[in-house]
Each structure stands twice: as C-alpha cells, then as structure tokens.
Amino acid sequence: MRHLIHKASFIALFIIVAFTGQQPLFAQSEAELIGRLRAKYDQVDLLKADFTQTITSPFGDVLPQNQGSLILEGNRYRVETDIQTFVTDGETTWIYDETEKQVLINDYVDDETTFSISSFLDNFHDDYEVLNSSLNYLNGTRHHELQLRAGSDETFFKEVTLWVRDTDHVITRLRVLDVNDAVLEFNLDEIELNPAIEGNPFNFVPPADAEVIDLRY
C-alpha cells in the first residue's frame, strides 16, 4: 500500500473544527468504510493541502496554532508555515527558521511518533478497534466520523478519530491521543490528490544569508 500521511518532525498533523448533526452511521458499516479508505489511498501517491493544527497538553494547555501548506509523498514531505519550513527527501531533513535565519540539517529518521495514514490503514485490524461511528456535518459537508481505540498498550497512539468526507472518502480532519495524553488535532483544506508539481519540492537549498548547522557530523 502507498504512503500517506507522514508529519514533519516539528508537527503532528491535527486541529479542532466544529461539526453538528450527529446521527447513526447506516450507509456504510465500519468495515466497508475502512475498505473504501484503503482503496482510496491505495491510489494516492502525492497529497497537497493547506493545514491548521493544534496540540493540547495533558494539562489542558493549548500550544500556539500552526497553519500553512504541505506536500506529502511517501516519506518525503515539504511543510511550510509563516516562519518555518520543514523538508525531507527521505534521507536528509532540513528545518529552516526564517526568523533566526538558520537551517538545521540532519539525517531523516522515521519513528513511531509519526502518524502515517497508510500504515494505520494497513494495520487497522491488528492495532485498532472501532468504538463508535456516526454520520456528521463538518463545515457544512457530510462526513463519516470513526472513533478508534488501540488494542494494545504497545501502540503509541491510544485513540484515533477520523473524519472522512462522504462524497469521495478523503480524510479532512484527524484527532489522535498519544501515550503521553497529548491531543493532536489537524484539519486539511484545499486538498489535491496526485497533483502535478513543478521542480523538486523535497529538496531544500539554504538561502545565502542563512546560518547552516549540519548535525550529521
């Protein structure tokens, strides 16, 4: 199966969006919905979108909101906010802070704290069970909401909630609860699947006036 969604090392991809009109999910069973999700994302090589994300600590503190744009392709990504840019080609990672005029370069590391939709869907039946499913309206558009719980204490993300757009089975919102009881919420907008892109967005050339700190050595 192919490969979405990976987060940048600074960010886990998630935010709260109001929705109303809950009712039982009759149109599709959970198994049918997961099957349609897997079929959808099997066809996706590249995703481009705008995002808004927040993280709430176990103490109820809400960290500053992040928003920007992202391009994701397997373990390669480019995530841009107003002041920071995160890029990896799957081997090298660049983190550019525009305010500090500083670029950090390091080896790419994939770890369990990175939430991947493709890995999640591949291992869904082994790792998660459905707690609840309903048909809701998110920003005026009908969505299927799936509330899932990890079946093992070994899983880093204890709970996952997905909002799946009814018309095309695209995930537009996610919420996860990790083992540290942090809540990560992420909203996607202007989603494009397999768009044509110019150049190589997964490579980063530091600006001439930036300080470059290479952590690989």
Image: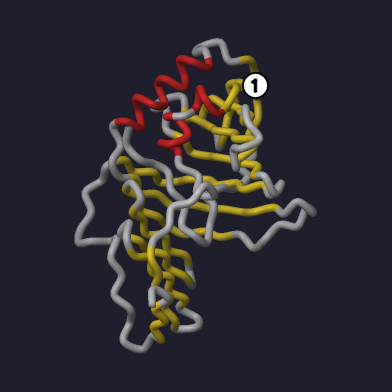
Q: x and y percent of residue 146 in the render?
A: 58, 26
Disc 1 element:
strand
Q: x and y percent of residue 18 in the render?
A: 64, 39
Q: x and y percent of residue 158 in the render?
A: 64, 37
Give whichever of 118, 20 is nearer the camera: 118
6 left or right of 26 in image: left
The residue located at (48%, 38%) in the rendering is: 172
123 left or right of 60 in image: left
Above or below: residue 190 compared with residue 106:
above
The amino acid beneath tag 1 is: Asn
163 left or right of 119 in image: right
Q: x and y percent of residue 173 in the render?
A: 53, 39
Is disc 1 surrounded by few (<14), some (14 to 19) or many (20+) residues within 10 Å? Answer: some
- Quadrant placement of the C terminus: bottom left
Above or below: residue 142 compared with residue 90:
above
Residue with the mark numbered 1:
132
Give whichever of 109, 34 is nearer the camera: 109
136 left or right of 98 in image: right
* Image quadrant assignment for residue 157: top right
The residue located at (63%, 15%) in the rendering is: 24
Most distant residue in the right direction: 59
The residue located at (30%, 37%) in the rendering is: 44
